[in-house]
C-alpha cells in the first residue's frame, strides 16, 4: 500500500476511535467501548508495522521521508507545515507507542470492567495515542508542541479520571500545572531556536546545526537547548519538576503503564534525540542534560527504597530510569538512550500492568505491606512480573541489561561523560536492584499478609495475555542491541559474530556520532560490565537478607539510621519545600493582589463604568414608557425645538 | 346692515392664524385626551388645519397645486379614519373601553 495512505490511516484511526467513543461517552457498556478503542489502536499498530517494513526495504540513505499535508502557519519568514516525518527514529517510536498501546488497551478492557464510564476512559486513551503520534510524527517543532500539549491534556484527564475523589483531582491538577512550567521552557526554546536558525523544521534544523560553533554558556543555541531541556524536565519528570509523576499514580493503573511509564514521559528523551544534531553542537547544554539525568536517576532510586505503595515504587523507578535515558542522551549516546527507552517501555509497562493485576486481585489495595505470598495465588502475574524484575535490574540476557549497560559504558567512554557520572549510574543500578527485589519479596514471595476478607485470584485472560506478550518482550527486547564487544568474549565469542547490533544499524543515519570518542577497549568494557553486575548481585543479596522473614534486619537498619530513613520516607521533603517556599508564597501574593489591587482598583473601575451605562440606560428607559401620548409629545417638542433653532439661525 | 368691510379686510394672515389655532387645539387634544375616539377627532382637526393653510395659500397665490394636495390629504384622512376606527371597535370589543392606556401594554 502507498506509504502516505498508511501514515494517514495510522494517525487517523485513534482519532476516529476517540470521536466514536467520545460521542457515546455516557455508554456503560465496557466491552463495546473497549473493542472500539482497542481496534483503533491495533489498526494503527498494523499500519506502523507496514510502514516499518516498507522503510526497511529502502536503501539506508532513502529512509528519511516527509509527508506534507498542508501549510499551517505562515507569518513573514516563519512557516510551519502540517507534515509528518517518517524516518528510522519515528518508526521505532511508532512501534512502541502503538504496540505497547494496543496491549494496554486490551488490558484495560479487563481492568475497567467494573467502571461505570468506560467509553469516556477509552475515548481519552485513544485521544492520547493520537496526540502522541502527532508528537512523534510532526515534522517541525511547532507541530510537535501541539502533540506535546495534547498528551499533557490527556494525562491530566486520565489522572483525574476518578475526579470525584478530591485527592485524585488534585493530582491531575498538579501534573498539569507542573507541566506548564516545563512547557513554557519548551516554547522559549522553540523561539530561540527559530531566532538562531530561522526555521522550526526538523530537516532544515539538521542541515543548519553542523554549521554552528559555540562554547559559551549564553550563546543562543546553548540557551535554546537548555530551554528545550526544561520542557523535557517537565514532561519527563526530572529534578526539579519530577514531583507530579508519583502523584500521577492516582489514575487508573493501565494509564500509569501507558502514559506515565512507557510513552508520554519518554517524549522528552525522544525530543532530544530528534534534535541530536542541534544538541551535539552545544556541549554545555549536554553537560546539564547528563548531570540532571544522573542525579535524578540516583535520588529517585533512593526514594523508591522506602515507599510502601506498589505504584509509588514503580513511579519513582520510572523517574529513575528516565534519568538514565537523559544521562545517555547527555553524554551523546543517543542510540543508547533510545534503546533504553524501548526496553524500559516493555518492562515498565509490564510491571505496571502486573501491579494493576495485583491491585485488581486485591480489590484496590496498593500497600505492599498488606500483600506477600501472592506467588501461589497469581502464577501468571508473578511469572511475568518476575521477568520484568530480571529485566529492570539488568540481569543478562534480559532487556534491561543491554540498554542500561550501553548507557553506562558510553558514559564512561564518551568525552562528554565522566567517571563521576558513571559511578552515580552504577550506584543507581545497585539501588534499582535493591528496591525492585524488595518489591518482589514483599508482594509475591514470603508469607502472606493479606487481610482475611480479601481473596486474591488470578486475573482474566484479557489481562494476563498482554502481560505474557510484554514478558516475552522483556526477555528478548534487548537482543536488538547486542553490543559488538561480545564477539571478543573468550571461548564463546564466535557465537556473537552473527548477531548484529540491529538497533545501531537502524538508527545509524539518524544520529550524530559522539565527537572525539576514544577507541573502545574490550577489557575495559567487560570490566565495567562486570562491576555493574557485581553491584547488582550484591544489592539483590542484601535485599533478600534484609527482608527475609527470619530476621528483622530491615527494621533494625531503619531504626539505626532513623534520620536517613525518615528523610527517604518523606521523599526529602521536596513537596513540603515547594509548598512552603514557592506555592504558598505565590498563593499569598495572589491573594494580596486580589484583595488590594483587584478589589480596590480594577473592580471599582469596572463598577463605575457599569454605573454610568446603567444610569444613562435608566434615564432613556424612562422616556420609552409605552404611552403613545408621551411619544406624540416628544415629536411635538422636537418639531418646536427644530423650529426655534431654525428661527435663531 | 352689518359692516361688510370687515369681511373684505380678512387677509391671508387671518386664515393662517386660524389654521394655527386649530392645529394647536388638535395637538393639545392628541396629547391630553385619553379617549381614542377623541384623539382621532383631534388628529382630524390637525389635518384640516393643514388643509386650510393649503387652500388659503392656494387662493392668495393663484395656484391650483395646493388644492390638489388637499384632495390627497382628504383621501388619506378618510383611509386613516377607517383603519383607526376599526382598531377602536376591536379594542372596545376586547376591553370594554377605549382608553389609550390600554396601548401601554404594547411596550417592549
Image: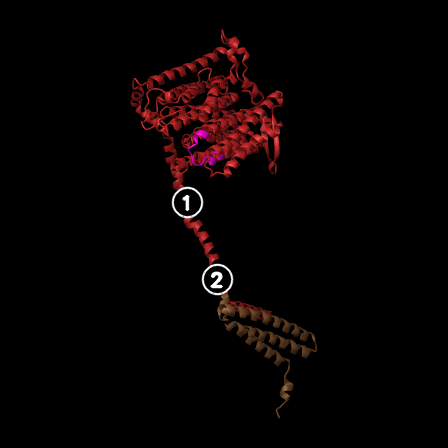
Chain colours: A red, B brown
Q: Is residue A45 left or right of residue A176?
A: right
**Which residue was labeled with disc 2?**
A619
Would residue A574 be visible to someone looking at this image?
yes
Residue A213: horizontal and vertical position, in percent? 56, 25
Range covered by the magenta-colored residues: A109-123
Badge 2 crowding class, 10 Å Cα cut-off, few under 14, some 14 to 19, many 20 or more, is few
Nearest-to-viewer mark from 1 and 2:
2
A98 relative to B61, above or below: above
Q: Are marks 1 and 2 on the same chain?
A: yes
Q: Which residue is at the far top?
A: A491
Disc 2 chain ID:
A
Magenta segment main secondary structure: helix
Badge 1 crowding class, 10 Å Cα cut-off, few under 14, some 14 to 19, many 20 or more, is few
- Nearer to me, A397 or B35: B35
**Which residue was labeled with disc 1?**
A593
Instruction: Using the rendered view, name the quadrant where residue A530 is placed.
Output: top left
Residue A287: horizontal and vertical position, in percent? 48, 24
Amino acid at each position: 500500500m502507498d506509504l502516505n495512505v498508511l501514515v494517514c490511516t495510522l494517525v487517523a484511526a485513534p482519532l476516529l476511535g476517540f470521536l466514536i467513543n467520545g460521542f457515546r461517552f455516557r455508554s456503560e457498556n465496557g466491552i463495546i467501548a473497549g473493542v472500539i478503542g482497542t481496534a483503533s489502536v491495533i489498526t494503527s499498530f498494523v499500519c506502523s508495522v507496514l510502514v516499518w517494513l516498507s522503510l526497511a526495504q529502502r536503501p539506508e540513505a532513502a529512509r528519511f521521508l516527509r509527508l506534507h499535508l498542508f501549510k499551517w502557519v505562515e507569518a513573514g519568514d516563519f512557516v510551519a507545515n502540517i507534515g509528518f516525518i517518517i524516518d528510522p527514529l519515528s518508526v521505532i517510536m511508532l512501534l512502541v507507542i502503538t504496540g505497547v498501546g494496543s496491549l494496554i488497551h486490551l488490558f484495560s478492557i479487563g481492568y475497567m470492567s467494573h467502571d461505570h464510564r468506560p467509553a469516556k476512559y477509552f475515548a481519552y486513551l485513544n485521544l492520547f495515542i493520537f496526540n502522541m503520534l502527532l508528537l512523534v510524527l510532526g515534522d517541525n517543532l511547532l507541530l510537535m508542541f501541539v502533540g506535546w500539549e495534547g498528551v499533557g491534556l490527556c494525562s491530566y484527564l486520565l489522572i483525574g479520571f476518578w475526579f470525584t475523589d478530591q485527592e485524585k483531582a488534585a493530582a491531575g491538577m498538579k501534573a498539569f500545572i507542573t507541566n506548564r512550567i516545563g512547557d513554557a521552557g519548551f516554547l522559549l526554546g522553540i523561539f530561540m531556536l527559530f531566532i538562531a536558525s530561522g526555521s522550526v523544521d526538523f530537516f532544515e534544523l539538521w542541515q543548519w546545526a553542523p554549521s554552528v560553533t559555540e562554547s559559551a554558556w549564553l550563546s543562543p543555541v546553548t540557551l535554546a537547548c537548555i530551554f528545550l531541556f526544561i520542557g523535557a524536565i517537565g514532561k519527563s519528570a526530572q529534578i526539579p519538576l519530577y514531583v507530579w509523576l508519583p502523584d500521577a499514580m492516582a489514575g487508573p493503573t493501565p494509564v500509569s503503564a501507558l502514559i506515565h511509564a512507557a510513552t508520554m514521559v519518554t517524549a522528552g528523551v525522544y525530543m532530544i534525540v530528534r534534535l541530536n544534531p542541534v544538541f551535539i553542537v552545544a556541549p554545555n547544554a549536554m553537560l546539564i542534560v547528563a548531570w540532571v539525568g544522573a542525579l535524578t536517576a540516583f535520588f529517585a532510586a533512593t526514594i523508591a527504597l522506602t515507599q510502601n505503595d506498589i505504584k509509588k515504587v514503580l513511579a519513582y523507578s520510572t523517574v529513575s530510569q528516565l534519568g538514565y535515558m537523559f544521562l545517555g542522551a547527555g553524554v551523546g549516546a543517543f542510540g543508547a538512550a533510545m534503546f533504553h527507552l524501548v526496553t524500559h517501555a516493555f518492562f515498565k509497562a509490564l510491571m505496571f500492568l502486573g501491579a494493576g493485576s495485583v491491585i485488581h486481585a486485591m480489590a484496590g489495595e496498593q500497600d505492599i505491606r498488606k500483600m506477600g505470598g501472592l506467588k501461589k495465588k497469581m502464577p501468571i502475574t508473578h511469572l511475568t512480573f518476575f521477568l520484568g524484575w530480571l529485566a529492570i535490574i539488568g540481569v543478562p540476557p534480559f532487556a534491561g541489561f543491554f540498554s542500561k549497560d550501553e548507557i553506562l559504558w558510553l558514559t564512561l567512554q564518551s568525552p562528554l561523560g565522566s567517571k563521576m557520572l558513571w559511578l552515580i549510574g552504577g550506584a543507581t543500578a545497585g539501588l534499582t536492584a535493591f528496591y525492585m527485589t524488595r518489591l518482589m519479596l514483599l508482594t509475591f514471595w514470603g508469607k502472606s499478609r493479606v487481610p482475611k476478607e480479601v481473596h486474591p485470584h488470578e486475573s482474566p485472560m484479557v489481562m494476563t495475555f498482554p502481560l505474557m506478550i510484554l514478558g516475552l518482550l522483556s526477555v528478548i527486547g534487548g537482543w536488538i542491541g547486542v553490543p559488538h564487544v561480545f564477539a571478543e568474549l573468550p571461548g564463546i565469542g564466535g557465537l556473537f559474530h552473527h548477531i548484529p547490533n540491529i538497533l545501531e544499524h537502524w538508527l545509524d543515519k539518524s544520529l550524530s556520532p559522539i565527537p572525539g570518542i576514544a577507541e573502545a577497549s574490550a577489557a575495559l568494557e567487560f570490566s565495567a560490565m562486570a562491576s555493574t553486575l557485581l553491584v547488582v548481585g550484591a544489592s539483590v543479596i542484601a535485599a533478600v537478607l534484609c527482608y527475609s522473614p527470619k530476621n528483622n534486619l530491615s527494621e533494625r537498619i531503619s531504626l539505626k539510621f532513623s534520620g536517613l530513613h525518615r528523610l527517604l520516607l518523606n521523599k526529602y521533603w521536596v513537596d513540603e519545600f515547594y509548598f512552603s517556599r514557592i506555592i504558598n508564597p505565590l498563593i499569598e501574593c495572589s491573594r494580596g493582589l486580589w484583595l488590594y489591587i483587584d478589589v480596590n482598583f480594577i473592580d471599582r473601575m469596572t463598577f463605575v463604568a457599569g454605573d454610568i451605562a446603567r444610569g444613562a440606560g435608566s434615564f432613556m428607559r424612562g422616556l420609552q414608557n409605552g404611552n403613545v401620548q408621551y411619544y406624540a409629545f416628544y415629536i411635538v417638542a422636537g418639531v418646536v425645538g427644530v423650529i426655534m433653532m431654525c428661527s435663531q439661525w | 346692515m352689518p359692516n361688510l368691510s370687515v369681511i373684505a379686510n380678512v387677509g391671508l394672515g387671518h386664515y393662517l392664524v386660524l389654521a394655527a389655532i386649530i392645529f394647536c387645539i388638535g395637538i393639545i387634544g392628541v396629547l391630553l385626551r385619553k379617549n381614542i375616539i377623541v384623539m382621532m377627532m383631534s388628529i382630524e382637526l390637525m389635518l384640516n388645519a393643514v388643509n386650510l393653510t393649503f387652500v388659503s395659500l392656494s387662493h392668495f397665490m393663484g395656484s391650483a397645486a395646493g388644492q390638489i394636495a388637499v384632495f390627497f390629504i382628504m383621501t388619506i384622512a378618510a383611509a386613516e379614519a377607517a383603519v383607526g376606527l376599526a382598531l377602536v371597535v376591536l379594542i372596545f370589543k376586547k376591553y370594554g373601553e377605549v382608553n389609550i392606556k390600554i396601548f401601554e401594554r404594547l411596550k417592549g
